[in-house]
Image (spheres, rainbow, N blue to C red):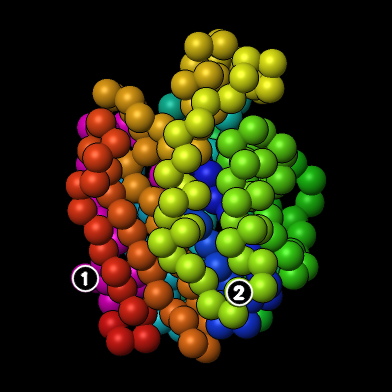
Amino acid sequence: MCLAVLAIDVIPDAPVLVAANRDEYHARPTAAAAPWRDDPRIIAGRDLQSGGTWMGMTRAGRHALVTNYRDPMTIRPGAPSRGKLVEDFLRGAVSPSEYIATVAASGAAYNGFNLIVGDGDDVWYYSNRGPAPRALAPGIYALSNHLLDTPWPKLARTKAAFTDILRGAPSPDIEALFDALGDRSVAQDAELPDTGIGLERERFLSSAFIVGLTYGTRSSTVMAIGMEHRALYERRYAPDGTPAGRSNWDVRAV
């Protein structure tokens, strides 16, 4: 996954609210978000190539997401799957702080990542390319392929839109959140980060929603977790950016 905005204790009906885009090669085999056959407590998509998932939740309100940290000079082909970090938390029962501490102890084995995990009581963040793990206080956070709240143009735009949508709202406006995730605005060259992939690639990846023949936004997901909402909504897209399917799961009813 390459872009996520997270609100913690911002709106009453959904104390945890996440809106995210997964950018990936279109040829990579993927299962749509659904209850897992081998563990129906989990509702998430599945990476059918390396295993695990990029984002998901459970009936009990555990939730997790991971993004890659963009640093092409340090990628190791044989490193373990980062998607397993999300899967293992969703399958488990330990607290977010305990799980993050365990991951941090072995974080050097992985290619660069950002991990957020929560259970309805606490939300924790850790990157194996950043400072020590930390609990997230109430507020709105944004994450892409660098550290938490790094102000890349697409992240700043999406976070601002997310903040506007939530301002004064008792419940999440799901359609408005998907609209924000669908922003295809390309950043000006002067605003682009330099992550070692070249200007043309930086420009291509600078929109919140990416359209490309071989690589682009595969899906957008909104997770709402609280007493009144415990749901996961996923929308999938074809290489040309047109809709290719959707899943709506009321997790309390699964």
Q: Which residue is drawn at 58% across and 46% down?
A: 158
Q: Tell me which corner region of the image, top left, top right, bottom left or bottom right, holds residue 125.
A: bottom right
Q: Tell me which corner region of the image, top left, top right, bottom left or bottom right, holds residue 55.
A: bottom left
Left or right? Give the position of 183 relative to 7: left
Q: Residue at x 25, y 58 (%)?
A: 246
Q: Where is residue 204 in the image (x, y as percent from the top left)?
A: 47, 21
Disc 1 secondary structure class: loop
Which quadrant: the C terminus?
bottom left
Q: Position of residue 248 (x, y in %)?
A: 29, 69
Q: Position of residue 100 (x, y in %)?
A: 65, 61
The amino acid at mark 2 is: Ala
Instruction: Check disc 1 and report the residue beneath it.
Output: 37
Prevalent SS, magenta region? strand
Instruction: Check disc 2 and report the residue beneath it.
Output: 169
Q: Which residue is drawn at 29% across and 36% down?
A: 241
The amino acid at mark 1 is: Arg
* Few, some or many residues within 10 Å of mark 1 (<14, 14–19, 20+): few
Question: Separation of disc 2 and disc 1 at Cα?
Answer: 36 Å
Q: Which residue is drawn at 20% across and 53% down?
A: 245
Q: Is residue 128 visible in this depiction of the protein?
A: no
Q: Which residue is more in the foreground, 205 or 30?
A: 205
* Few, some or many residues within 10 Å of mark 2 (<14, 14–19, 20+): few
Q: Which residue is more in the foreground, 79 or 18?
A: 18
Q: Which residue is more in the foreground, 246 or 90?
A: 246
Q: Position of residue 211 (x, y in %)?
A: 35, 30
| Vertical placement of residue 58 versus 243, above or below | below
| Vertical placement of residue 240 versus 218, above or below | above
Badge nearest the viewer, 2 or 1:
2
Look at the image and give the residue range highlighted in magenta. Answer: 21-43
